[in-house]
Amino acid sequence: MENFVPYLIVALIQVAISLGIFGFVMVNALLLTLAERKLLGWMHQRLGPMEVGPWGLFQPFADMIKLLTKGDVIPKAADKFFYSYSALIAFTPSFITFAFIPFGLVGGIKLVAADTEIGVLMISAVMALSVIGIILGGWSSGNKFSLLGAVRTAAQEISYEIPKTLAIIAVVMLAGSMNVYHISSIQRVWFIAPQFIGFLVFFVSSLAEIFRIPFDLAEGESELVAGYNVEFSGIRFAFFFFAEYTYLFVTSAVITALYLGGGSGPEFLPWGLSSLFWFLLKSFAMVGFILWFSRSLPRVRADQLMNMAWKIMLPLSLVNIIWTAFIVLNENLLKIVVK
Amino acid sequence: MEHTVASLAGSWTLTSILAVLTMAFPLLGFIIVGLCGKIAKEWGPKLATVTIFLSLITSIVVLGLVIANGPAPTVSFVWLQSGNLTLDFGFRVDQLCAMMLCVVTLVSFLVHLFSQDYMHGDPGIARFYAELQLFTTAMLGVVTASNLLQLFAFWELVGLCSYLLIGFWFHKRSAYQAAKKAFFVTKVGDMGLFTGIVMCFILSNPHTLSLEALPSALASLAPALLIIIPLLIFMGAMGKSAQFPLHVWLPNAMEGPTPVSALIHAATMVAAGIYLVARCMGLFTLDPSGTALKVVTYVGSFTAIFAATIATVQDDIKKVLAYSTISQLGYMVMALGFGKFGYTAALFHLMTHAMFKGLLFLGSGSVIHATHTQNMHEMGGLFKKMPITAWTFILGSLALAGLFPFAGFWSKDAILVGAEATHSTIPLILALITAFLTPYYMTRCVWLTFFGKPRKENHAHEASWRTTLPLIILAVLSVVIGFVGAPFFGELFQRFIFFHEFESEAVNWTLIFGSTGLVLAGIFLGLAIYAWGWFKKETLIRILKPLYLFFKNKWFVDEAWTFIAVKPLFYLSEFCHWFDRTVIDGAVNGVAWLSVILGNIVYWFDAGIVDGLVNLAGYLTVKVSELVKWFDENVIDGAVNGVAALTGFIGSKVRKVQTGYLPNYATIMFASIALVLILVAWFAVLN
Amino acid sequence: MNYLLLILGAAIFSFGVLGALTLRNAIRILMCIELMLNGANLTFIATASQLPDPGLAQSMVVFAIAIAASETIVGLGAIVAMYRAKGWVTLEQFSLLKW
Amino acid sequence: MNVTMSQALYMALAFPALVFAALTVTVKNIVHAAICLIGCLLSIAAIYVGLHADFIAAAQIAIYVGAIAILILFSIMFTHDVSGKQMSHLNRQAVLGVFVALALFGSISFFIMNTSESQFTTNFQGQMALPPKTSLMAVGDVLYSENASTPYMVPVEMASFLLLAAVVGGIEMAKKKEDEV
């Protein structure tokens, strides 16, 4: 075997990094649940969870223990195989997307697991895979409400994929590359300024794609009991849950990379650690913004959801592309926007 | 000297940017007002007027810049590229363009302002303004276009807007029919234009459609083609500029709102044809024999006198103005036919005509708005009630009549000088007759409208400043704008717009006095008939009855169209019907009749002689046929039935192939592919 | 290695053919057509990787994907319409062009 | 024939692709078939990555898996009852179909095996060591180049028109008509 040892070392390092990211994902998702509940509490002028640990800080760990130790119920009408693994299918892509997120440039090393030319396309492609898990989960439960939730999910996902991709295309036009790191580092002006319409479209479409509150029809409690995950419990439910919160962070990170200049900001730490700092700061700020935004709005109806995708978001994103073409064709304007 | 703006790249000069802005403002207005629709009823008209005002300002600045710095370099970007086909989208701002920008935006602005009152309360007012804005954009696009295809695109957009605006009151049958007529008739010309453009592109070497590069790219063509191509382009101009025989749409187009008539059918859209020919003048002069230009001259001069005669007998005030427009357009086209001798004069006349014809139409609009009728015989006595309208209308009429020193005089004189310079005797005579007829019918029109006793009860009164201000502005311009081209004031216009090189015109006193004399004579005749009553109108009509009827019926052109295009079809079918009824039916009936007679003869012969023989033969035959019958029933029928049964049997088996079941078909398809592959493998590869 | 990939393409194509010929459900047949297209695409890409400039062959695959997408839209639209009309999506029910 | 690292990798990817393709056709439950189709598509995407066709791989995942497969799943949910119980999934000419498919596969393989190896391996070494440009750039150069030898601008536009027409047609066909309930 040619050059086996270096391959092995690289592979081991990659495994280590992957495990690190996995840990980050888990802890992150747990903390986000707490953050959401706290935030929601403050918005309601409540305190939020206060019982477990000082100031309720250990609440998510308690929740996790509860979920992991719960009985593992498989409904009789379920399709056993897919019922068992749909949660994993939903969760895995969320984890894969981390490979394409540019956390920064530390000590001359790009913190991007897969620094590929087509990173943006890959992110949106991989994110679309999750919905397969959700559809399968809904279908394999053998429950009408689950199935309805799953079908709604599919429709929603396909519809909002289009404006979202078109918004991304505008960014790609501006940056002249699909490499996420390249896009995040090329911004002279944060793209949220020249791409404000695109940002709006991307933001709303992303909310729809990760089923945050104004668009959480897939689990509309009032009409579908709890949507696709009504039959799930224990660790499977936990994985759906993890996927949802991981996507919350992933979306924020992608918005940070595409529209908020990635890790750019004043340098105050050695070895370029500040870029990591700024990236995480912006991402978590974005998470906070999404939580705030989504918790302030009521859920839309299914027909409103579709109308919004096809009659508002799609035209808006097309307008945005025309506007972007205008910038790109004008060299002097382009010079103002990108490095 | 170039005013390069630092923040924009390329050869964009301030002039070009302002020219594009001139186009952009009305486009913006169109998008906003057009998209907002009914909710823009209140603010839409105001917004549209503001955008067009901005456009007017930028266009004046453009004109100033062009006067100061000369034409801006053409800016263009690639519009469309596929294979070796490359089309540019460019803006060419030169003197002609700058002049047209100013004329279009000025008239358009005044019309916008005028319509505020005229269209007030109309349910479709927002649509009206949106269409006006789109029209202005399209017209400015025609003017700034740098290549023929781009020009054609905006040209068609202009045609579309004209269609929409003529048919603005589409619930009126006559309006939408007029709109359709205008659209179709101009399309006849446009077909020629498009053919010409395609020919230009195919035949030019290197392939180009750029207006600047075309003449040199086409120069080496065969002479016949050099006649055909300009004439095809001229066809487009004939349609848009309402030249005989494609003028028929313009009088009908008066069904549109009057401001639209002022904007489209007097000042701008019809000028597009003149502009097109002027822009392509380089192509027209390529032909060494000058045939194309001669055709242009004759078409123009004939149209001029033709329309003028019709205008003398019209009762509808707008129709008078419409025919007068056709006549004046004929003037311009005739001047264009003089090549470089008439180029400047034609464009000069275009500009002055835009002013006073816009004024006259707006004035008539004011009158119509006040009296709610368009028939001049129902007006009269309005001078006291509507002094501003009357005065401005009279000034406009004098300008149109070409009385010294109004605007029309100078431009008309320039055209006559051009005719004289090219020794075109027949066009000159026709133009002089027209110069006599024009003041006559305008005098008639003014007198019937404003003087004498009111012939019908009305409560006419002057409208608000929004109506009168445009009139006053245009009246002032009608009076003074001629001086920019007057030979006594330095021939500013001639120095500004010219073809190839500027040539000062000699002052031709004979023509000046001659034409002034004709104008005065025309006015005098008009006054003599209508004001002083020296001749009884009825007497004149009786004396000149054939001529009167001829003019009254518009030289029977509509009828001629009917006769040339519609009737022949009708008659052909009539003839076919007659032929069918008479000849064929006759032949058939005749044959039948003959048959009856023959039959009678034959019957007698048959019953008498033949039957005897036949009966004998019959007996024999019966015997034979009994034999044959047996043979037939058993042998032949057996064979036939057998074949039929066999066919049916095979069919009932074979039809099963048609299963309608897709996998069957797919199987056969793939099996065939596999079979072919196997056969190829067997024969070609293995052996 | 090339043989492997080309034969893999052929095999996937043939599985698509097999399914298209033997299955009853219209949606499954559509799925099999996707399989066939993928077999063809794989052949394209495998061959392209041996060329100095793989762009042309890969562009063809882009076109193929575009056509596959439109075909799926129209096909599924037709199938849903069929389902609305008859309540079935098996092809035996839709042999209207029968003798 | 000694197996190199990359060949082993391709075999490792080809195996699931083949198995999933087979399962797509043979599995009884249609939802399972759809999932197997997705698996097959993903495996093929992985092979594309190995062949330096990153962009095509991403397009494969985004369009085939992300859109087409989900659309198929969506229509399955639309046209089937939840239980998924069906009568025989094979039609009445299944045996014939097997033979035809086998014949097709056999003949195609025959041609592949019979083509001389040199026709496949031009520039093979240099190619794999250093791809000239990224897949994205290569595709972009061909599709949007201003070079007259590859005039694919118009075909691209036509493909976009085709997609538009397909969308409109799909909506029109699948739409509930006014008179239907």
Image (spheres, coloured by chain):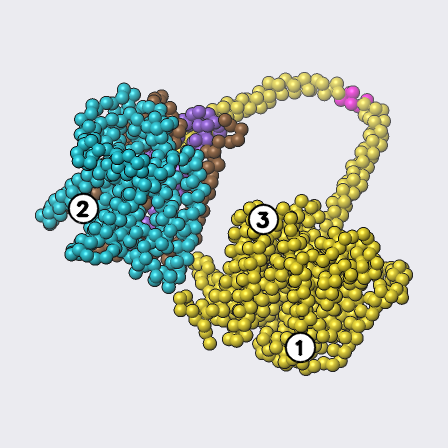
Chain colours: A cyan, B yellow, C purple, D brown
Chain label for disc 1: B
- Disc 3 target residue: B41
B350 sits left or right of A171 in the view:
right
Is the residue at mark 1 from the same chain as the one at mark 3?
yes
Q: Chain of mark 2?
A: D
Query: Which residue is painted at 65% across and 72% down in the image?
Result: B481
**Is mark 3 in CB contact (under 8 Å) with mark 2?**
no
Query: Dot 1: few (<14), some (14–19), or many (≥20) neighbours within 10 Å?
Result: many
Q: On what subunit does the disc labeled 3 rest?
A: B
In which quarter of the view is residue B237 placed? Answer: bottom right
Q: Residue D104: horizontal and vertical position, in percent? A: 32, 36
Q: Nearer the viewer, residue B258 or B475?
A: B475
Residue named by callout 2? D6
- Where is residue D35? Give x, y as percent: 29, 32
The structure residue drawn at horizontal position 80% and vertical position 72%, both measured from the top left corner, is B520
Residue designated by label 1? B486
Magenta stretch: give its range.
B612-617
